[in-house]
Each structure stands twice: as C-alpha cells, then as structure tokens.
Image: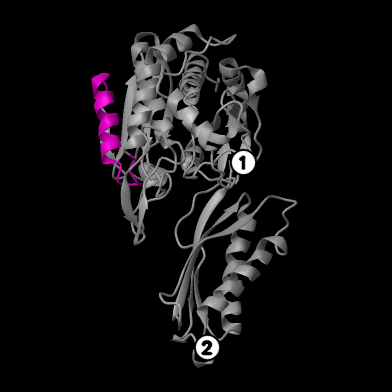
Amino acid sequence: MRPATAIPLALSTALSLALALPAPARAQQAGERPEVTAAAKAVDDKVVAWRRDIHANPELGNRETRTAALVADHLRALGLQPKTGIATTGVTAVLKGGRPGPRIALRADMDALPVTERTDLPFASKVTTTFRGQETGVMHACGHDAHTSVLMGVAEALVAMKDELPGEVMFIFQPAEEGPPDGEEGGAEEMLAQGIFGDFKPAAVFGMHVFSTLAAGQIGVHAGPTMAASDRFNIVIQGRQTHGSRPWGGVDPIVAAADVIGTAQTVVSRRQDISKQPVVVSFGAINGGIRYNIIPDQVEMVGTIRTFDEGMRQQVFADLTNVAERVAEAHGATAVAQVPDTKGNPVTVNDPALTARMLPSLQKVVGADNVVDPGLTMGAEDFSFYAREVPGLFFFVGATPKGTDPKAAPSNHSPEFFLDESALDIGVRAMLQVSLDYLNDPPQG
C-alpha cells in the first residue's frame, strides 16, 4: 500500500457535500446484461445507505455483531435462511435458482481497522476502542463497508431474478479479514475450517476490493499470483535496565533494537533475489521504555513480511531471525524472535483460466479501456484461502475520485481513505455480471 497523503481540505469538503446526494445512475455499457443494469439501478440507493450506516458504525475483527445482524436480517427479509455465528460472527446464505446450473460463491469481508478517522464526512466514524492496550479510533479505512453493502445489494438483485437463475449462489459475509484478535481464530481460514464448503462446494469463488490506487470507473485484475503472502513477526530485545545517565550500568535494548532494524534492511536488499519476485519486510510498531531517564529492560518490535515465492518466504523467516538474535548478542542483549508469530495468509492466486474467461464480463461493465492489469500487489488478502480450495477470481474496483491522482490519494488503511461512491455501483454491476455470465455459460468439464 502507498503511504497516506491527506486530502486537501477544500476537496474533502466538496466531496462531503457531494455525498449528501445519491450517486447518479451510470449508463449501460455495451455488452452489459440489461438485467444487470436494471438490478443495479434498483438497489443503488439502498447500497449507498447501507455503506454509510456501516461506515459510521465500524467493528473490529470477530466483533462485527451489529454488521452481521444487519446482514442476516436483510438476507432473511429476502426469503433466504442465513447461517450465523460462523467463525464467531460470519454469515452465509445459499440462493437456489429456478433452473439447473453450477454453484458459485461470492464473498465480502465485514471488519474495520483500529484507525482514527480523519475525514469530514457527515457519516465519519466516531467509534473508539482499546487495541493492544492503546486507545484508538475504529474506521473502515480499507473499504470493507463497501464490500459488505455491495454483496447485500447483489444478493437482493439475484433473489429478484431467482426463477430464471441457473444454479446456486452462496453469499459469504466474512469477519476478521484483517486478522482476528490475538489469541483468537478467525477469517477465511476459520470459515473454511467450520465447513462452509463442506455441503456446498462451489465451482468458482469471486471477490472484490475497492482500491485507492485505481480511479473511480476502473477495474483492475491480474491473472495468476496477484496479492502477496502476508506474515507477522514479533521480536523482543531483552536488555538490563539502568539509569539513563549510566548506560554502562546495564544493557541498552533500545540501541540494540535500532541496530536490528537497520541490519534487517539487508534481509531484502542483500539476501533476496528481488529480480525473481518482490519481497517486503516492514517494522510497524516499536514499544519500549516509559521514562526519559531510564534505559528499559526490553523493547518489542512487530512488523510484516510480504512475499510471492514460498522458498523466499522461508528464507526471510530464517534470515530475520538470525539478524535479530546475532545483532542483539553483539550488544550484550538477547532476542526472542517469533518469525512468523502467527499463521499468515498465503499468496492470493487468480485462477488463470477463470480470469481469462471472466475478463470480458468485467470489460462489459466499465469498457475494455477501463479494465487494467495492476500487476503484483504487495497487499495481502485471506481470500487466498478460498482460492486454494476452488478456482478463484479477485478483482479491484477503483475508489479514487476522478480528477485526483491515485498515486497521491490516501491509501487503503489511511485515516484519510476516501471512497468515491460510484465504486458501489460498479461493484454491484461487476459482481452481477461475472455471476450471471458464469452461471449461464459455465466451463465445460
């Protein structure tokens, strides 16, 4: 993800005022199914309202009780029979069409992030919580509010045409895509572990993500490995506490930690063949000490590793552990390096045959010139677990308003992240188009 860049105040205010009105309906593209155009128009206002409501009431992973209830109530009102409480707060429902055909699954994630929102939207989040011992805001800074509302709209649209619908569709509303709280299980892997693909094994699974690096009106899709494997690490440097005026009276874990961070840069720059595949090692938080004139006992560091190749992934684990332990030892300290410290997400792979087959469907929604290949994305997604079970397609929907350079726009996970709500309409149309095209003309064999 690119670093955050604040929206200029004048632009932010203008955008906020524009949001007071529903997004205008978009004209039907050449080749787009007429039923897609009509269905998207019918649910447009509802999708916008759901998104704003969910945005104003965000919930962290495995805590999405309000959002899950909103989803389940909507599915029941459509005449479906949702299953709730899957992987803590997950919701699924199956729609059986009136004609024979294949099975597919459509997935949306529901969780927000521990981020304090810095926008002037009329529905900006004011929610706060305690995360890892620190007070913080809660915000849909990655667009999962959009994903949830889009899939709610898609479910309503498909139910309305169920008599003529071939096959069956599973709607998956998943918690904890950003990871469950420490000590808990959650996310896509846990949804699968609890058997959502047991009695219902789809022939394909589809997902989408709104993305700041694309302009509104664009769709991004890349065949094969698409999003990186993601792993967390935790390194604790243990020194010996002493007075700040007498550093020789103890062992300074802060200086050792700084040296570990500096030397860790060579894990990528000098030990990995990045001409083969990209690799990222980033430190995300450092905690140590409490007073200006006390050298503390220990420093804790946490961060993330992103890779596309399993061999390179394992080598980074070994090299980062070695750096932490040996550099700490050189300072007279010790290091406990958990690399990785939890089960990570594997690489998200778009099935090449499925991607090629559905590319025309995406082009029908926004036009061929507006479907782009974003290349490899260092962000990660636990949609990867579904795509390991069955052929998967995960695509990106542009979120940055036209006229704003996506390279300068606040990125996903930024407190200034801003979603152009025309992305909701495109998301609904794209999911409907790929679903109907696949169900009506499934791959043979």
Position of the C terminus by quadrant: top right
**In the rendered image of this protein, does residue 143 appear above or below residue 157?**
below
Q: Residue at 27% x, 24% y: name it.
A: 74
Q: Which amino acid does label 2 sit on?
A: Pro
Q: In the rendered view, how is the structure colored?
A: one colour
Viewer-side label of 1, 2: 2
Q: Which amino acid does label 1 sit on?
A: Pro
**In the rendered image of this protein, does residue 244 appear above or below residue 356?**
below
Position of the N terminus by quadrant: top right
Q: Which of 113 and 276 is in front in this view?
A: 113
Residue 10 % position (x, y): 52, 33
Q: What range of the chain is rendered magenta?
A: 58-80
Give the distance between the C-alpha atoms of the residues marked 1 and 2, in whole angstroms: 49 Å
In the rendered structure, the answer to whether residue 380 lies left or right of residue 56 reads right
- Residue 247 tag number: 2
**In the rendered image of this protein, does residue 284 appear above or below residue 57?**
below
